[in-house]
Image (spheres, rainbow, N blue to C red):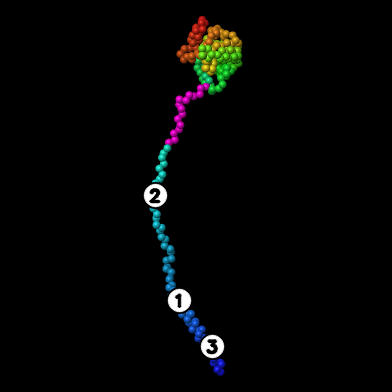
Amino acid sequence: MNAKKLLTMGMLVMAMALSACGSKEESKKEDVSEGMTTVAPTEDTTPVETEAPTQEPEVTEAPVIEATATVAPKQNEAEPKEEGITIYYGDENAEHIISTQIPKQKVTPELLVAELAKKDILTSDVKVNSLKETKKDGAKTLAVDFGEKFREILFSQGSAGEYIMMGSVVDTFLKAYGAESMTITVEGDILESGHCIYDSEMKFYEPSSKDSAEKVSEGIANALGVE
């Protein structure tokens, strides 16, 4: 009997101890829960947008751009243009000697004859047998010997046509070679026509816009002593 009572009393003591511990834990939880403050959420949960403070744009001075004008280099107006080769020939009415220029190139007797043929002063089959340059009293003079065809063309001309032909040939050769006078022969012989005997040096035929070719040719004939 005593043993059973002791066992029963021990169990009661343990149950009471456990119960006390449980009440202490609950009281602690209640104390903690009482210390915590529950914040209820507000009904309007929309976040309030706050405007960022506006910053005034930084004022910077625009760079100063100096206007500059591009000036093209001036061309030297006084610079002489390159001259070509001057070819002399008769106008449409065969009354006056006029001229034109071809591009500058090597001057040869054949070139001059070819250009004179284009202007109907000579024909392309006219031959130049020789051309000699000499100096006389410091001035250049030419001695040109043509083939027989040159005389045939000359004989077919009237006095005005002869003036145009001879003046065009003499002026073209003198100008191209920078000479002051020249003589013309045909196959080594003195050239003569029914109007003139060309046995002396001939100078530049001045192109005239006033006098007709016939008058000028008469003047040349008189100067050469031809009636």
Q: What amino acid is at disc 3?
A: Met
Q: Is any atom of residue 37 visible in this view? A: yes
Name the residue tied to disc 1: 32
Which percent across, then down, holds residue 28? 46, 78
Farthest front residue?
A: 138
Q: What amino acid is at disc 2?
A: Val
Are there few (<14), some (14-19), or many (20+) residues within 10 Å of tag 2? few
Instruction: Give the residue displayed 41% in from the left and 58% down from the top.
Output: 52
Q: Nearer the viewer, residue 56 or 79?
A: 79
Q: Nearer the viewer, residue 76 or 50?
A: 76
Name the residue tied to disc 2: 59
Q: Is any atom of residue 218 visible in this view? A: no
Inspect the magenta stretch and tell me whether residue 143 lies in it: no
**Of callouts 2 and 1, which one flags the residue occurring earlier in the amino acid sequence?**
1
Q: CA distance from mark 3 to mark 1?
A: 32 Å
**Of callouts 3 and 1, which one flags the residue occurring earlier in the amino acid sequence?**
3
In this view, 182 is above or below 45: above
In this view, 57 is above or below 127: below
Determine whether label 3 and label 1 are within 8 Å by CB: no
Q: Which residues are magenta?
A: 69-84
Which percent across, then down, holds residue 110? 58, 18
In this view, 90 is above or below 56: above
Query: Which type of secondary structure does the marked residue at label 3 adopt?
Result: helix
Quadrant in which the N terminus appears: bottom right
Are there few (<14), some (14-19), or many (20+) residues within 10 Å of tag 3? few
Q: What amino acid is at disc 1?
A: Val
Instruction: Give the residue displayed 46% in from the left and 15% down from the top.
Output: 209
Which percent across, then down, holds residue 79? 47, 25
Name the residue tied to disc 3: 11
